[in-house]
Image: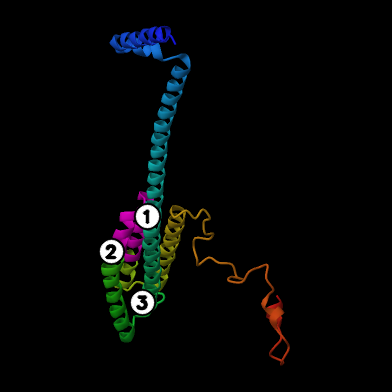
Amino acid sequence: MNHAPLLRRLGNRTRELLDAGNRPARSILELRVDPETTAALLAGGFAIAGSFGGVLISGILARRTDERRLAAEDERRWLTDRRASYSSYLGLAESMLKEIDSVASFLSYDGEQPVTDDDEELIVEGLAEYLVKWDEVLQPALGEVELLATPGVADLADRVSGALMSLTSYVETRRAFTEYYPSWFQAQDLVEVLKNAMRVELGVSARLGGATLGRRLADWPWLSDRPPREAYFQGHSRHDSPRHGDLL
C-alpha cells in the first residue's frame, strides 16, 4: 500500500501548524476566533458585568434600608424619651397647682378678716414645701423638657414654671383669696396650652377642647348622649326615685 499521499498531507498540516505557532498572538486570535465565538465572549462579558452591577445595586439598597431602619429606631427612642419627659413635667405642674391652691385657701377671703395663727402656721409650712419642690423637682424636670423639646414647647414649659412661681407672691404677701384665684385660673389655662402643644409634638393631631378646666358645662362629667341619672332609679323605696330637681 502506498502511504506517500497520506504522509504528504500530514506533512503539509504539520507545517501549517508550525507556521501558525510562529505568527504573532494577534494573528492567532484573528485566525481562530470566529463570529460565533465572538458573540459568546461578548455575551459572557455582559453577563459578568450584569452580575457585578446587580451585586453593587443590592449593596446600595441594603445600606439604605439599614440607614432608614436605624433612623426609625432613633426616632422611636426620641419619641419615647419626649413622652416620658412631657408626662412627668405635666404631672408635676398639675400637682403643684393643687398644692399652691390648698395653701392659698388659708388666706383671708376678701382681705377684711386677718389670717388666724393656726392658718398662718399652715401657710408658712405649705409655702416652704412648695418652694422646695419648685426648685428641686420642677426645675430639673424643666431642664429635661428643654433638652428634648422644640423651641415652642420649651418656651411654654418655662412659662408654666414662671406662672407657678408667680402664684406664691399672693401667698407670701397674704393677699386676699379673691385677688389670688384669677391668677390661679390663668396658670391652669397655661398648663392646658402646654399640654396641647406637647400632644401635637408627640404626633397626636387632636387637640383637647376647652383649655380652662374651670369653665365646664353644668352637666360635666356626664355624656349628653347617655341616659341621665334619673334613668337609673329602680324604685326600691320612697328615696329611690327621682326628685323634682332631677327631672329638670
Residue positioned 38% across, 63% down in the render: 84
Reading the image, the residue beneath label 1 is 78
- Range drawn in magenta: 141-165
| Disc 3, SS | helix
Reading the image, the residue beneath label 3 is 103
Task: Indicate the quadrant where residue 67 lies.
Answer: top left
Q: State whether residue 45 is above or below residue 31.
A: below
Q: Choose the circle earlier in sequence order: 2 or 1.
A: 1
Residue positioned 42% across, 7% down in the render: 5
Residues at marks 2 and 1 touching, judged by CB atoms closer than 8 Å: no
Along the line of sight, the residue nearer the viewer: 172 or 165: 165
Within-10-Å neighbours for mark 3: few <14, some 14–19, many 20+: many
Q: State whether residue 13 is above or below residue 153.
A: above
> Disc 3 residue type?
Val
> Disc 1 residue type?
Trp
Whether residue 11 sits left or right of residue 195 in the image: it is left
- The mark lying in front, picked from 2 and 1, is 1
Residue positioned 41% across, 74% down in the render: 110
Residue 65: in magenta span: no
* Farthest front residue in view: 1
> Disc 2 residue type?
Pro
